[in-house]
Amino acid sequence: MRYYLDAIDQNKHLNCFLEVFAEHALQRAIELDSKPVSGKLHGIVLGIKDNICYKGHKASAASKILQNFISTYSATAVERLENEGAIIIGRLNCDEFGMGSSNENSAFGPVLNPNDNSRVAGGSSGGSAAAVKAGMCMAALGTDTGGSIRLPADFCGVIGYKPSYGRVSRHGLMAYGSSFDQIGVLSNTVADTAAILEVIAGPDEFDSTALPNNLESIDLKSEKKYRIAYFPEWIEHSSIDPEISIQLKDYLKQLETNGHQVNPVSFTLTDFIVPTYYILTTAEASSNLARYDGARFGYQSEKKPDNLYSFYQHNRTEGFGKEVKRRIMLGTFVLSTGYYDAYFTKAQQVRQQLKKQTELIFKDYDFILAPNSPTVAYKLGEKNKDPLAMYMGDIFTVFANLTGVPAVSLPVFKHSSNLPFGLQLLSSTHNEVSLLRFSHQLMQQ
Ligand code: GLN
């Protein structure tokens, strides 16, 4: 335990942890040491993203509006980790309410990339990715609504796993886009990811969207040859760094040489995925974030309100950051009378189309192989003045959340700038076992 606490101390400049539960973690380590090993994760040291509740501890979603909020219960995922002997060492920085791609939207400052401190760690689970990369915890929980586990994993060089929608209960996760949100894992090995996922997955009476079955103990060994699809529209996309494109193509050739079947599959809906994602998630966010009014919990302005309306107005104006307000307004707009059918209904129709196309692809293929991001980690401040440029950086990750399929980022590449980048692998929905097995196979090479 002291090893991790020292590592956290030495890496303070990265701004990964919003709070370290040092006393609590040491105490728990002593308790666990005095007991025979029983749980599957006995003594495993984990960090959790700050939008996940942990009873008796603060959870702020990296927002001023919740900066002093203390959870009265633990998320199901956290409760299950603790029941199996894990130690929660602290809460990790992220973009406010998970809204962002670079971790620059935190009310408590950006997270720096451990590989190059002048660059972003990626978001929104930037604290989770950077903490695992820099050895401040063994693994971490993150959340992924449109890429927030995979993108920072890609930028920092760790494994980032987003399960199928419903695989992990969302009870105790602060909602952003409820039909997209998933809790997942950032780690150094596929075996670690599998061990944690087995524990946190499964049905939950507090989340009716949680899948009904548990994940049994996953045997990762597999020599199987698979059928792999890739979208030329993505690998040749106008926004992609040519070097990322070349390395991906070489990787595909290598897979073919190794006996896998690799084929291009045309994906004609590429231009629609980012707009569809931002219409639907902002609509859901505008509703989800209505609960933060300062009346029952959260930030209350010092300004004296004239009436109830101005009470809400002061609290929300001062409590929410710029990006969160932008999304609440956008979401309210797409849901408003007169625009609902033009935007929200259309976007839902596109989502259905995407799901249908995806099902068809997975009839013929085991996996889709793709980039995670058009670029490697960029400089702090490079994109955050231009929200559209930032949104377009999500072009390859939001597909998995729109369709609900599981997806992982594997740190297999190195750019000439010396920065890491990942390979994204997607499988059909609920097919975590195959996805983890193939990921393990690829990481062994
Ligand atoms: N970058 C995406 C967004 O800003 C994804 C965020 C996420 O997955 N939480 O919405």
Image: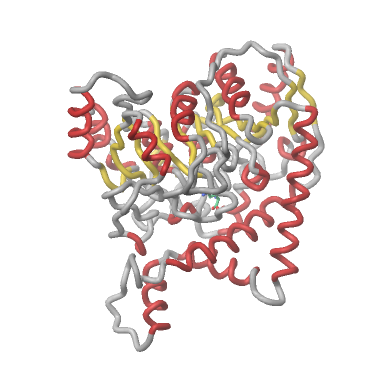
Q: Residue at x 59, y 29 (%)?
A: 432
Looking at the rendered image, the quarter that the C terminus falls into is top right
> Percent from the top left, x then y, of residue 228?
73, 25
> Percent from the top left, x then y, of residue 18?
31, 48
Q: Extreme front residue here?
A: 205
> Percent from the top left, x then y, of residue 322?
46, 65
Q: Quadrant of residue 106?
A: bottom left
Looking at the rendered image, the quarter that the N terminus falls into is top left
Q: Residue at x 55, y 17 (%)?
A: 220
Q: Quadrant of residue 292?
A: bottom left
Q: Nearer the viewer, residue 277 or 220?
A: 220
Q: Residue at x 40, y 77 (%)?
A: 312
Q: Extreme bottom residue here?
A: 306
* Above or below, 342 relative to 82: below
Kindly tell me whether residue 353 is visible in this rendering: yes
Q: Nearer the viewer, residue 63 or 374?
A: 63
Q: Quadrant of residue 252?
A: top right
> Percent from the top left, x then y, of residue 333?
62, 72
Kindly tell me whether residue 243 is visible in this rendering: no
